[in-house]
Image: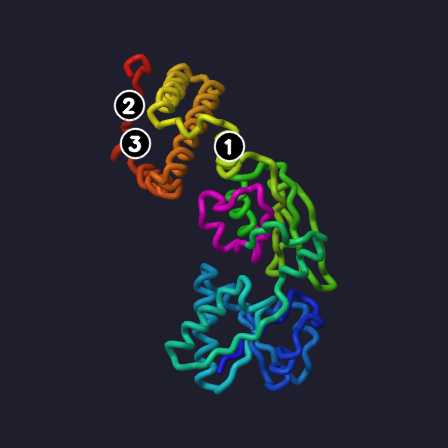
């Protein structure tokens, strides 16, 4: 049997009664990391084993988590029962939980998951904010593998698991695709513990904090920049206020889209970046009008068009990247 138990965000007072009962029932426990304030309050007759040494040996966190899961299941097969402790709640941003469940299932080892207080509640309390409306919870380990932020930046974002400054630097590059460098963000260290610290600073500086460790999370407030969603809302409002919208056709809209595309082509030839930006804005606005019309008459869904666009992206410049620009007068 493997009992995966949450230690809470920091203070020993956040450990639930059920988790404490499991800890008191064994002579030794296994904790994913040693740096957690709750571990300091454990009875002296309970031996605490940790997996910190794996973080120093392995090249990636994925390898570390895989080795931890393997080790925990092997220990259960050998000892009969293992109490494995993780920060916060085992089902909130804890990669090893699912790995152990999967390995336990394939090895015939029962796995019990005991909830704990997650980092979310204490982090929100430290920031003095409400999770509603619409705060998005994300994992830094997943975001750093992306080229662009997969969320609209006009929604608050709470990011967990930023263990070091290197990870913070990679995360910053992703966030800068959606937010201005001066956008104010908050690093929350040791939420819910006596060592709790909140640091507010510009986005482009947060990876320089010397306090970043395995109990650090990042809060990114919403910004007021326009998004694809807000553009679509503006289009819908325009449609609702236009009495003749039901009579509009794609054929009627097409000439304006063509003129906008010609502006873009002309700007690429003259090298005028302002004109190029203006032309691209017009192309996008007219494209959204076509998307709205298509959705209204059920010709297609915007999601389908976006999916097709993703496929086209890989062929934009051909196999050799030899796309040619022609004079707009030739169109």
152 in magenta: yes
Q: CA distance from mark 3 to mark 2?
A: 9 Å
Q: Secondary structure at mark 1?
A: helix
Q: Secondary structure at mark 3?
A: loop
Residue underneath mark 3: 317
Picture residue at 58% right of the left edge, 36% below the top: 180
Picture residue at 48% right of the left edge, 54% below the top: 142
- Residue 233 sits above or below residue 218 on the image: above
323 in magenta: no
Q: Nearer the viewer, residue 265 or 259?
A: 259
Task: Using the image, tell me which numbered label, if any, was put on residue 240.
Answer: 1
In this picture the colour scheme is: rainbow
Q: Secondary structure at mark 2?
A: loop
Q: Position of residue 222 (x, y in %)?
A: 61, 43
186 left or right of 110 in image: right
Write down the quadrant of residue 319 in the picture: top left
Part of the protein shown in magenta:
138-165
Picture residue at 53% right of the left edge, 67% below the top: 91
């Amino acid at each position: 049997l493997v009992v995966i138990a949450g230690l809470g965000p920091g203070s020993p007072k956040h450990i639930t009664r059920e988790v404490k009962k499991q800890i008191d029932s064994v002579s030794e426990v296994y904790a994913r990391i040693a740096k957690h304030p709750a571990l300091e309050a454990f009875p002296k007759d309970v031996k605490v084993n940790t997996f910190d040494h794996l973080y120093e040996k392995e090249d990636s966190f994925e390898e570390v988590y895989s080795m931890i899961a393997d080790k925990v299941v092997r220990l259960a097969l050998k000892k009969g029962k293992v109490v494995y402790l993780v920060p916060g709640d085992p089902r909130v941003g804890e990669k090893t939980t699912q790995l152990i469940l999967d390995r336990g299932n394939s090895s015939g080892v029962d796995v019990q998951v005991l909830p704990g207080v997650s980092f979310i509640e204490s982090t929100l309390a430290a920031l003095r904010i409400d999770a509603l409306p619409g705060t998005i919870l994300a994992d830094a380990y997943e975001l750093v593998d992306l080229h662009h932020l997969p969320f609209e930046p006009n929604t608050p974002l709470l990011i967990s698991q930023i263990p070091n400054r290197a990870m913070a630097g990679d995360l910053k590059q992703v966030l800068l695709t959606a937010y201005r460098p001066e956008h104010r963000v908050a690093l929350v260290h040791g939420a819910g513990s006596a060592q709790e610290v909140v640091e507010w600073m510009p986005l482009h500086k947060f990876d320089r904090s010397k306090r970043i460790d395995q109990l650090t999370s990042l809060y990114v407030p919403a910004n007021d920049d326009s998004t694809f969603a807000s553009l679509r809302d503006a289009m819908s409002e325009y449609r609702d206020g236009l009495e003749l919208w039901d009579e509009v056709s794609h054929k009627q809209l097409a000439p304006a889209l063509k003129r906008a595309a010609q502006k873009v082509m002309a700007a690429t030839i003259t090298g005028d970046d302002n004109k190029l930006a203006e032309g691209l804005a017009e192309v996008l606005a007219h494209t959204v009008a076509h998307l709205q019309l298509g959705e209204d008459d059920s010709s297609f869904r915007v999601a389908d068009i976006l999916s097709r666009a993703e496929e086209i992206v890989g062929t934009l410049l051909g196999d050799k990247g030899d796309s040619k620009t022609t004079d707009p007068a030739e169109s």
